[in-house]
Image (tube, rainbow, N blue to C red):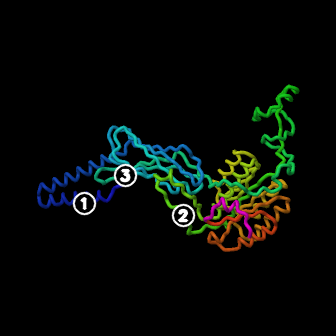
């Protein structure tokens, strides 16, 4: 319960009325005092009954959406008692950026419910609990506020912003007929390597029925990887490499009524890491749609390495991992390459995403070339984010080695930057 300032004003008038009645012996002051006392008690009882039994339910059809999408949520306030409520304030205390779900409703009848729908333009990746939610109501005279809080039940996973690439470099190692990789894989591929006895957990679709009939016990097929080079995506999350500009262009808020007719352009935060995360998700999406085996490595708060796999399941794992990654890693770009290079097959394509503008980027590229890999570098122009220059010099040295290069700039269109052929 919260006592408002009007309560103290009324209490002062009550005390003054009693004092005046005792001093003048006039019944008028006593009547005023009794009336004010009645108002106080009436307001207190009204407020206690108003908050009693109230509940709120929050529901959404989808709890996984990318940055730039519209999140729609339904609020339902239920009044199970026989008496009505004059007004109820719904206060959304979730930390979802841009959310404007708080609302005041009036004249809620007995044993009735009121619903409303809110729409939020998602602007930041991460996990956001949908709540807590607080209900606030009070008395007609505004003397007391009574509150009831409901903990969050669900959470929203906001995925990185993804652009649909029409083109991204296909290096020679990716072409059909590339280097054969004779390694066992858990995936079904066109290349069967042999048969073995059935083990618990093996899918029934892998049973080799001819061998099973011949040996009189269940045999399953084993497969080798498709003879095409893998794609590895390495994201630099070194804590001292990324830049966040203090002043940046922000998307103008759009009224919820116009969400369905107004197409808002998505502006990422002026943060080099957010741009690289978006580029990383877009590149992974492109390679998976091209039926390539993709792996992912980064070192933010913890080291993350997803082995190469194909298909939508692998894409979902990469994007969900990117939604939760932070730029707080101890490894530089060279350290990240050295940590993972021994696990990457020769001939693989390695997409290196980094904001670094020092010689370590060149050393990382040289290390990949020395190991007979095909690097592709995605950099950010640090000066466009308010940082020091030097990115273009490093980019020129990388291009001199014949390595494909993409440069991202603050508030530029990511789709255009990733598909543009840069000449430094």
Report the residue marked by disc 3: 1
Residue 219 picture quarter? top right
Q: Which residue is mark 1?
A: 12
For residue 240, above or below residue 197: below
Q: Classify mark 1: residues with Cα within 10 Å, few (<14), some (14-19) or many (20+).
A: few
Judge by depth and name the residue closer to the eye, 305 or 235. Answer: 235
Task: Identify the residue shown where x is 64% and y is 64%.
Answer: 272
**Foreground of the two, 32 or 22:** 32
Q: CA distance from mark 1 to mark 2?
A: 49 Å
CB-based contact (under 8 Å), mark 3 and mark 2: no
Label 1 or label 3, whichever comes before in sequence order? 3
The mark closer to the camera, 3 or 2, is 2
Relative image position of residue 212 (x, y in whole percent) = 84, 28
Q: What residue span does the magenta drawing correspond to? A: 411-424
The residue at the point 46 percent across, 55 percent down is 255
Q: Earlier in the sequence, mark 3 or mark 2?
A: 3
Q: Look at discs 1 and 2 and give the one toward the viewer.
A: 2
Q: Label 2: state its secondary structure.
A: loop
- Identify the residue under disc 2: 250
Query: Which quadrant holds residue 414?
Result: bottom right
């Amino acid at each position: 319960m919260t006592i408002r300032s009007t309560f103290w004003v009324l209490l002062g008038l009550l005390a003054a009325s009693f004092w005046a009645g005792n001093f003048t012996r006039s019944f008028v002051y006593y009547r005023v005092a009794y009336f004010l006392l009645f108002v106080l008690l009436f307001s207190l009882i009204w407020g206690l009954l108003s908050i009693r039994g109230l509940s709120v339910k929050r529901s959404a059809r989808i709890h996984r959406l990318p940055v730039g999408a519209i999140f729609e949520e339904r609020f339902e306030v239920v009044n199970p008692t026989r008496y009505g409520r004059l007004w109820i304030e719904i206060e959304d205390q979730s930390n979802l950026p841009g959310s404007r779900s708080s609302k005041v409703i009036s004249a809620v009848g007995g044993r009735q419910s009121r619903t409303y729908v809110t729409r939020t333009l998602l602007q930041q990746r991460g996990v956001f609990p949908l709540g807590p939610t607080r209900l606030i109501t009070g008395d007609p005279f505004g003397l007391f506020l009574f509150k009831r809080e409901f903990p969050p039940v669900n959470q929203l996973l906001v995925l990185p912003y993804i652009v649909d690439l029409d083109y991204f470099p296909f290096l020679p190692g990716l072409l059909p007929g590339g280097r054969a990789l004779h390694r066992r894989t858990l995936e079904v591929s066109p290349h069967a390597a042999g048969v073995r006895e059935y083990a618990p957990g093996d899918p029934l679709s892998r049973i080799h029925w001819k061998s099973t009939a011949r040996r009189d016990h269940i045999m399953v097929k084993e497969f080798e990887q498709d003879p095409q080079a893998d794609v590895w995506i390495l994201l630099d999350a070194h804590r001292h490499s990324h830049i966040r500009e203090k002043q940046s262009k922000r998307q103008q808020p759009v009224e919820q009524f116009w969400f369905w007719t107004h197409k808002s352009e998505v502006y990422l935060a002026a943060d080099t890491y957010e741009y690289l995360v978006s580029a990383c998700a877009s590149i992974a999406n492109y390679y998976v749609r091209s039926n390539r085996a993709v792996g992912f490595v980064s070192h933010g708060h913890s080291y993350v390495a997803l082995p190469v796999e194909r298909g939508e399941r692998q894409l979902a794992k990469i994007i969900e991992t990117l939604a939760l990654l932070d730029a707080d890693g101890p490894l530089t770009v060279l350290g990240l390459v050295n940590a993972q290079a021994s696990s990457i097959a020769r001939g693989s394509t390695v997409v290196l995403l980094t904001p670094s503008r020092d010689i370590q980027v060149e050393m990382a590229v040289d290390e990949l070339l020395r190991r007979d890999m095909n690097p592709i570098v995605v950099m950010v122009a640090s000066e466009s984010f308010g940082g020091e220059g030097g990115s273009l010099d490093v980019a020129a040295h990388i291009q001199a080695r014949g390595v494909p290069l993409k440069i991202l700039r603050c508030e530029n269109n990511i789709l255009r930057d990733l598909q543009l052929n840069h000449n430094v």
